[in-house]
Image: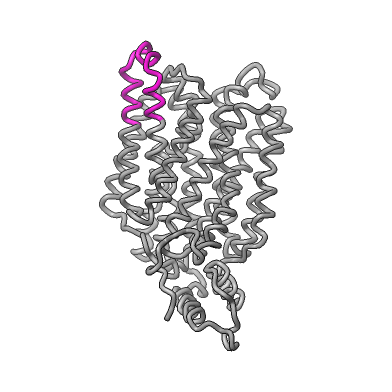
Amino acid sequence: MVYSVVEQKAKMFSARYRWQAIATMTVHIMTLVHGVGVGWLAPSLFFLASDQSPLSKPINIEEISWVGSLIGLGALAGNLTFGLLLDLIGRKLCMYFLAIPNMMYWILIYVATDVSYLYAGRFLAGISGGGCYVVLPIFVAEISDTNIRGSLSSMVMMYVSVGIIIGYILSSYLNYYIMPCVAILLPIAYMFAIIRFPETPQYLLRKGRNEQAKKSYCFYKNLKFTQPNSESANVDTENEFATFKEQVLSGGVQHNVGWKDFSNRMTMKIFGLSFTLVICNQLSGSFALFNYTSHIFAELHCQIPTNICIITVGASQVVGIICTVVLVDRVGRRRLLLISMTGMGLGELSIGLLDQFASKEFLTETNWLALLLMSFVAFIASLGIIPLVFLVIIELLPAKIRSIGTSICMATLSIFIFVSLKIYPLMIFDHGLAITMFVSTSVCCIGLIIFGLFLPETKGKLLTN
């Protein structure tokens, strides 16, 4: 009888899923490293803009907006580069290359004498992060059984969020020059840690390497590999892999991708939903808010130490994503996304109203209110719109164009990362925090309507077609 995953309880560390979970947690060391690089910015901005700046002169608001936003342009380059490499050289080799730009980022921070070093470093960090968002979600989705794929795929943003907190803490309490010396050790450790994991079985089947594909399949499903005609061959394992192979190849993944694969009505609808997801992900402020947290608390006249506020908001993100990991395979993707967009819109509206109508004296006396609202927005954004975008896009796209389609969607995401990180500090500085929050609230409302009407539930969908 062929093994039925559906019949098994989704215990992540049961024998069936053990190597899937271990591989997922190991490869996401790289997303943790990316999060550390993102988290480094917020506590460092005031220091870089002060008279004690390690640069030749303090940076100004225009330079701050470029330092913040160039990670988005780098991510765009990373999306496109790794999207092209993904099917050419495979998932595994791409994962090695992810670490190199990140290591160069920390070296540039250490040797920086003017802001141009930070521009180059943030661009390189973006290349690494953009590559992570293309390569790692596909790798994890392809090695995962259907009924734990949501939990494992949601870990990408959990690791980023934990990394952001680590970046907050280290850059807040470590010397400027010690921070990059510590951080660069993580991508080095990552490169050694992923050595033992094989290429995904889907990629190997696509390249016609059937025996290697079977070995990979057996490794990630924790099954004993045997030759098909040997005396020790397990009939259930042979049947299970044969079914899997047939499902993969029936999706046309061995055929060349053509324009017709993108121009049909169903695929265009999928791309429309995917682009809406990535636009809402960024223009709702889910990323920019947490890059410029210190500026937002300053606008709200919060007297609680900035580092404590930043770390608290980061911790709220982690709690939200942990809830997502627990809930996503139980309640589904669509419901969590709708809850997240609703809550985020209400939270940002509240922050805007607080800034618009509350007096400076009231804000000073109720420091906890600003921190509570920012923590709520961080939590509710992390319950859906932050971690599930990557998973839903991969599950929506057909197998034949999944690598290219994911790359296109992540490139679009990176463009809007750049846009949001570039305009947010300028909008806050020129038009005020309240207007900025009202714009983000409007984006949440639009996303809520579109997702409510058109977004299907992708829970349980097979990735072989």
In this rendering, the answer to whether 16 lies above or below 415 is: below
Q: Which is more toward the observer, 187 or 130?
A: 187
Residue range highlighted in magenta = 348-374
Residue at coordinates 44% horizontally, 59% vertically from top-left?
11
Any part of residue 117 in sight: no
Quarter assignment of residue 364: top left
The extreme front residue here reads: 14
Image coordinates of residue 373 in percent, x first then y, are 37, 29
The extreme right residue here reads: 111
Based on the picture, tell me whether residue 89 belongs to the magenta stretch: no
Any part of residue 387 in sight: yes
The answer to whether 129 appears left or right of 239 in the picture is right
Magenta residues, dominant SS class: helix
Image coordinates of residue 91 in percent, x first then y, are 59, 61
Image quadrant containing the N terminus: bottom left
Image coordinates of residue 452 in percent, x first then y, are 27, 50
Residue at coordinates 56% horizontally, 57% vertically from top-left?
22
